[in-house]
Image: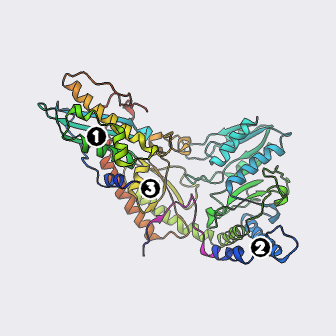
């Protein structure tokens, strides 16, 4: 039976898989030891569990377990990687290359470094959301110490040509880092195959708990080092101090193990449901998909419904939880910077909805979402003066609108 | 942030959605906001030539739920008032009526602009000088 509301916002977070929760529970009350306690069985038990999880995580991304550094989440991992590299390699260079469509955790970290004198080049993307490799290559210089490009975009789901990008970075002697928060556990990510030196990812986007993430730091060819951003007991090989979140880490490990086994089947099922959703919604006139439709995550689509405002639309799609590129709630009234980077007009940005399917999404839920969204779009268009003008053949872009 | 009951009511059952004949001398039309800002309101009033009482009001709005609700409330309040009385409707009245949160106050400002703009359109059509208002009004509404 259909249970409302329906969650179609899996790019923001995911429910913890019951199998993950089950694995975690004993580590709250029974095996609660501090993994850094070396002299009693409570500590040993916790350390053993952390070691096991570290291996489960390493296996999923093709890494060695010694290359996994636990953090509080992807934002911290991004900060540690970028700031840590900038400090550690300061004598080698002072330039970082990234994209305009990166997550704020990367962009704001780069902005903070700019204040400390680091030079950052923000390479624009093409209208499909993918970076032009030539433009990226042109941005990398002998002073570049790090190229940071996200694996998959959180708003539109497009997957960047990571292998080619890491080759460009390495050819110029720079390290390559990727924020793979949206990709790990959803599509195959292998640090060797893709030539990744540093990689940020997190448990809660892949059916694990919130509050635990990881930074992959390459140990061989080359051996990468980052300067710690948190001082303390020297945990995690001195790169990240702080008592380990043992239950969270156990859950993260279990989530990776499940993803390893089920990711491919999930992707096949979800891309079919996503395509159904997309095909049905595109039957509405003046509706477009944002971003490249070939190279993207299997469970994500971002659609603009012209002449309807996204936040108003979400209110009409009650019982279907999604997100919008409309920033009507922000003081700036600026729509999504990612959609703007694709060259979309602000108007289309305001009209966008991101649908993110997940492991527990059913076909019945997708049918409900199609029906609800279609009804809401039609209702709001009846209410929209822009839709009326469009039907009368008025070119809205020719009207001289006054701006607030 | 949850929506107030009144916003939900006006959003799900908006009052006075529609169009009046903008070429009629008795109809004043206000078109405010901009698509790039995520809000466009068109508010129209039909005025009795003798009494200057607003007999009918209609709107269409592109925007969030609060913008739709603000314009819906505005049309309800306009009907039955004279055009001079209508000028006393302030955005803060709408904020209060709908319990708009601070981030949504601009929706009420837009509704007030739409009211003033519609009244001005009517005044100018009927040889009266326009009243002063903020400049957030579309310059050439077609």
Which quadrant would residue A101 be assigned to in this image?
Answer: top right
Badge 1 or badge 2: first in the primary sequence: 2
Q: How is the image coloured?
A: rainbow
Front in this rendered view, residue A91 or B95: B95
Q: Is residue A170 visible?
A: no
Main SS of residues in magenta: loop
| Image side of residue A78 versus residue A388, left or right | right
- From this view, report whether residue B38 is shown above or below residue A155: above
The chain ID associated with circle 1 is: A
Query: What residue is rendered at 63% in x and 76% in y?
Result: A19
Callout 2 secondary element: helix
Q: Which residue is mark 1?
A: A392
Tell me if label 1 and label 2 are in contact, CB under 8 Å.
no
Image coordinates for residue A170, horizontal then vertical, percent: 79, 47
Q: Which residue is mark 2?
A: A49
Query: What residue is rendered at 53% in x and 70% in y?
Result: A360
Q: Are marks 1 and 3 in one subunit?
A: no
Callout 1 secondary element: loop
Image coordinates for residue B101, horizontal then vertical, percent: 44, 47
- From this view, report whether residue A33 is shown above or below residue A150: below
Q: Which residue is mark 3?
A: B2
> Is residue A182 found inside the magenta-colored segment of the image?
no
For the record, the magenta segment spans A5-19
Of the 4 image quadrants, the one containing the N terminus of chain A is bottom left
> Is residue A18 found inside the magenta-colored segment of the image?
yes
Query: What residue is rendered at 76% in x and 53% in y?
Result: A198
Distance from the alpha carbon under mark 2 to that under mark 3: 41 Å
The chain ID associated with circle 3 is: B
């Amino acid at each position: 039976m259909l249970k409302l509301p329906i969650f179609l916002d899996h790019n923001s977070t995911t429910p913890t898989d019951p199998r993950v929760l089950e694995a975690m529970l004993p580590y709250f009350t029974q095996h609660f030891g501090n993994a850094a306690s070396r002299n009693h069985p409570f500590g040993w038990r916790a350390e053993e569990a952390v070691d096991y999880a570290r291996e489960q995580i390493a296996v999923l991304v093709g890494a060695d377990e010694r290359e996994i550094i636990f953090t509080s989440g992807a934002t911290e991992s991004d900060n540690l990687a970028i700031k840590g590299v900038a400090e550690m390699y300061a004598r080698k260079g002072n330039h970082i290359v990234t994209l305009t469509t990166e997550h704020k955790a990367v962009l704001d970290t780069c902005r903070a470094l700019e204040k400390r004198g680091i030079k950052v080049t923000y390479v624009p993307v093409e209208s499909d959301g993918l970076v032009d490799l030539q433009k990226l290559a042109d941005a990398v210089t002998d002073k570049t110490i790090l190229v940071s490009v996200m694996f998959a975009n959180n708003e539109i789901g497009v997957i960047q040509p990571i292998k080619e990008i890491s080759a460009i970075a390495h050819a110029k002697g720079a390290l390559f880092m990727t924020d793979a928060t949206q990709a790990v556990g959803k599509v195959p990510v292998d640090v060797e195959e893709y030539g990744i030196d540093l990689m940020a990812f997190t448990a809660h986007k892949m059916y694990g708990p919130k509050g635990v993430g990881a930074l992959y730091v390459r140990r061989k060819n080359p051996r990468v080092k980052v300067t710690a951003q948190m001082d303390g007991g020297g945990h995690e090989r001195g790169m990240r101090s702080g008592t380990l979140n043992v239950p969270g880490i156990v859950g993260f490990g279990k989530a990776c193990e499940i993803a390893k086994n089920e990711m491919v089947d999930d992707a096949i099922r979800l891309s079919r449901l996503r395509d159904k959703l997309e095909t049905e919604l595109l039957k509405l006139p003046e509706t477009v998909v944002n971003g490249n439709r070939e190279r993207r995550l299997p469970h994500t689509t971002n659609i603009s419904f012209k002449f309807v405002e996204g936040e108003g639309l979400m209110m009409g799609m009650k019982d279907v939880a999604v997100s919008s590129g409309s920033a009507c709630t922000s003081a700036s009234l600026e729509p999504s910077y990612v959609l703007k980077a694709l060259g979309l007009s602000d108007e289309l940005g305001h009209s966008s909805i991101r649908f993110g399917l997940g492991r527990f999404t059913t076909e019945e839920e997708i049918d409900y979402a199609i029906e609800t969204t279609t009804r809401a779009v039609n209702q709001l268009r009846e209410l929209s003066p822009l839709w009326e003008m469009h039907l009368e053949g008025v070119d809205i872009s020719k009207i001289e609108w006054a701006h607030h | 942030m949850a929506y107030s009951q009144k916003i939900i009511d006006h959003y799900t059952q908006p009052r006075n959605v529609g169009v009046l004949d903008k070429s009629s001398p008795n109809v004043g039309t206000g078109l405010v906001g901009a698509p790039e800002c995520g809000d466009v309101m068109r508010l129209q009033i039909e005025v009795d030539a003798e009494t200057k009482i607003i007999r009918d009001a209609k709107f269409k709005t592109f925007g969030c739920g609060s913008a739709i609700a603000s314009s819906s409330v505005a049309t309800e309040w306009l009907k039955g008032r004279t055009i001079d009385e209508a000028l006393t409707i302030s955005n803060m009245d709408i904020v209060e009526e709908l319990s708009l949160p601070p981030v949504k106050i601009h929706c009420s400002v837009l509704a007030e602009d739409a009211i003033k703009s519609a009244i001005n359109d009517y005044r100018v059509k009927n040889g009266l000088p326009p009243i002063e208002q903020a400049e957030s009004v579309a310059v050439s509404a077609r």
